[in-house]
Amino acid sequence: MDRLITLSTAGSVDDGKSTLLGRLILDSRNLHATSADAISADAELDLSEFTDGLAAEREQKITIDVGWRHLSLNGDRYLLADSPGHEQYTRNQVTAASHADALIVLIDPTKLDLDAPTVRLLPQTYRHFMIATLLGIRDICLVINKLDLLADPEKAFVQVTKAINRMLDLQPVNSAGVVTTTIPASALKGDNIVRRAEFAEYTGPTVLEWLQETKIRVLDIPKQDVTSVMSVQTTLRSAGQSSQPFRGVAGRISRGRFSVGQAICVLPEKLTANIVSIRRLGDNVSEGFAGQSVTLELDRELDVTRGAYIVSMSLTEPERARALNACGCHLFWLDGTAGQTGKSYLLKTGTREIQARITELNEKFDPDDFSFVRLSDQLAKFQPECNGIYRARFRFSAPIWLELSSPSESVLNRFLLIEPQTFKTVAAGIFDVRLDPD
């Protein structure tokens, strides 16, 4: 299967995210000719320039927008997303993480108080790790970077590893199935990125080896019993008086796979049919996989319009999904303007848009304590603020279908919130019925 594996970075400002990806590209011999030409032969090598494409990023030596780069290794293809670390660019970090199969969280131990009885990580590290967990990323690599700058890197690695383990123990959301790996490294020097470095306290994989191991787990997902989902974009018909009339449902497969002969269900109407043929890029294929745009020909003429979902039949089981008029959620407020409880917004799930309103804010994530703090009844009526992560409750103008099991991994449960006057995306989130009171 020709499938891109998407890897995103996370962490605080100047932890070395761009440098790590630049080192990965350079040492794996994936440096594009145009990137090589952009760096003077007699200049000091700046690995971050391989991924920081904006002029403002190069001038300020920071990452502002998400930089996308390709990596090819032994026939496998990877898409690398270089994400910003500044709190004001959390919106961009959420965007990159929402596409990621795996995540690298970088930690700079030179910014931590290693003499403290209990070493604490930076708030932005906690925030990014929480975002990744909520978005259902199951493979997370924590890279303790810049160890070459410390007098005793072995001791620092042990101390920071303990801080990471405390974070994992305090995880305030369900993290079942998350696989974490901690790697000591120096992205600038290339230690444990592609080339293995001597480190007495560590015998695990390099970053490249971890990425290759992760690829195997990611590609195994479609073989498992997961719900297949396609968001319908349009209906296609053959033009004129064709001798072989064709009517197909076109869209992008968000998860799983669809195959010829498979029984499917159309939500929200719960109409059923079987797939007769699958077309991709003008050719008939036997299967379509996650990430591919396809056209499905069904054995029945159904009224399927933009905004509907094509799902595998397993999703119609009562314990797998339910049509709801209201639901709790984890909400990422991304706009500089505060939101309003009780105000009507456009809620976008897949290609469907309905009206919805925030009825209450229950809890807010505190990155300093890596926990959700209960809001008082008075505070629950306050406005969600930029970069805040909340547990909230919504009410919808029409019922929507939500998956009950593994909500963070279901595309049905993910949404965008749009300001109806300006059509500006102001928030993103994940619905989870487990957040509703019994």
Image (spheres, helix red, strand yellow):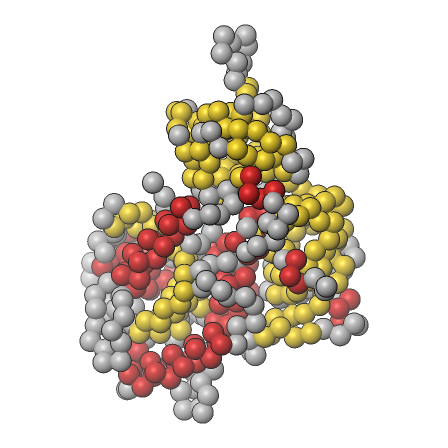
Q: Report x, y in % for residue 132.
A: 49, 62
Up-down relation of residue 6 to residue 332 (above or below): above
Q: Residue at x 47, y 55 (%)?
A: 96
| Picture quadrant of residue 214 | bottom left
Up-down relation of residue 403 to residue 18 (above or below): above
Up-down relation of residue 113 to residue 130 (above or below): below
In the image, taking residue 58 as reference, residue 204 lies left or right, namely left
Up-down relation of residue 237 to residue 324 (above or below): above
Image quadrant containing the C terminus: bottom right
In the image, taking residue 116 as reference, residue 202 lies left or right, namely left
**Number of numbered tags placed on the structure image:** 0
Q: Report x, y in % for residue 78.
A: 34, 50
Image quadrant containing the N terminus: top left
Is residue 139 or residue 79 the one in the foreground? 139
Q: Residue at x 29, y 56 (%)?
A: 212
Residue 57 visible? no
Q: Residue at x 21, y 72 (%)?
A: 197
Is residue 344 or residue 263 the one in the foreground? 263
In the image, taking residue 75 as reference, residue 276 lies left or right, namely right
Q: Report x, y in % for residue 205.
A: 27, 67
| Picture quadrant of residue 25 | bottom left
Residue 133 visible? yes
In the image, taking residue 406 as reference, residue 69 lies left or right, namely left
Is residue 313 or residue 283 the one in the foreground? 313
Q: Report x, y in % for residue 346.
A: 70, 47
Q: Residue at x 47, y 79 (%)?
A: 166
